[in-house]
Image (cartoon, coloured by chain):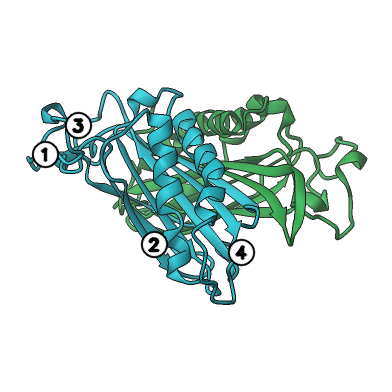
Amino acid sequence: MPEVRVRKRVTVVEEIFHEGGPVSTEPLRRAVALAVIDNPFAGKYVAEISGFMDDLKPLGLEMAESLVAALGDAPEVIQGYGKGAIVGSAGEIEHGALWHVPGGYAMREVLGGAKAIVASTKKVGGPGTRLDVPITHSNASYVRSHFDAIEVGIADAPRADEILLALVMTTGPRVHARVGGLKASEIKGEDGLR
Amino acid sequence: MKARIRKLAIFLEETRNEMGRPIDPPTRRAAAVAVIENPHAGKYVEDLSELMAIGEELGELLTQRAIAALGIPGSSAESYGKAAAVGENGELEHAAAILHPKLGAPVRRVLGKGAALIPSSKKRGGLGVVLDIPLGHKDAAFVRSHFDGMEVRLNDAPRANEIMVAIAVTDSGRPLARVGGLTKDQIKGEDGLR
């Protein structure tokens, strides 16, 4: 399979102190790691593409490690995660699906075994396309306070023959979470759901 | 702190490849953005000194955040720029009060130097408005390789009564600069221009 060639990396870190309500003593922090890579399958139908998932693993790890570093270098502070991909116009949505395994693997690896499925989304789009990457609790998908999403995008990517890959992590619930449901303190941690 | 900050966001970009050519070392730039309450939203206020004081504290905070993201000492910064977007209940003059009278001194203090004018842009807009922060070399405005711009955007800002303030800092110019003009090794550094 072809080498993974990165044109550009982008990291975004947000610190949210309040959203009109009480100012949080510990701000919610959310970080995004983006990588723009060549799409080796652009412009043609290639039947066998799955080997590229292994090639993406080192990049996934680099991105996941950069998120942990951006949020304070301590994997134990991470409570939520998600992933996504935007495929440039000369590619197909299936190329975005190549990110499921290496992206999820990388985050579990650096977090030391997070249990929940990694929420994800993907689309085909041009430069500047925005993607709302879904976020859930990393150990129990049903934790309602941690359902969130973060918008990502880069003005000049993805070009037609590129793929934009995204990983996101957060350090806690929505800043004024108060709509009930399963709480992080009630997680059983057996099935990744509750 | 005078500014009531709802949110901080730090954007870090690294270009490793451009038009198939490796960029080694990668060009890197960071933007730090604060979303603050506009104390004068919805009314005409003659004296804007409160916003000027906010500009002074944000000048220091955002510049420190930007160089921290780049992982460089202030003295290694090469270019800079600033911008602000005022929510719909504010006026353009509020952005001017933050950006122009007092913000520059702490930026230059953090970076050690900065003889050149800090290029700026401002606008009024709604949530998700795009800020194109102009960039120029910090010691000599005519250095052609460093004329650039960096786009930042937050989908949830500025709300009507908010102001979004951004400072961008780089450790490099454009990735494949080759249109001549004054180069950084020719800087005299006397007048901020050449």
Asked if A2 appears above or below A32 in the picture, the reply is below
Q: Secondary structure at mark 1?
A: loop
Q: Are marks 3 and 2 on the same chain?
A: yes
Q: Which chain is green?
A: B
Q: Quadrant of residue B125?
A: bottom left
Left or right placement of residue A83 versus residue B14 in this view: left
Left or right placement of residue A99 versus residue A8 in this view: left
Q: Are marks 4 and 3 on the same chain?
A: yes
Cα separation between marks 3 and 1: 13 Å
Q: Nearer the viewer, residue B62 or B141?
A: B62
Q: Nearer the viewer, residue A143 or B54?
A: A143
Q: Which chain is cyan?
A: A
Q: Nearer the viewer, mark 3 or mark 2?
A: 2
Q: Secondary structure at mark 4?
A: loop
Q: Are marks 3 and 1 on the same chain?
A: yes
Chain letter of the residue beneath label 4 in the structure image: A
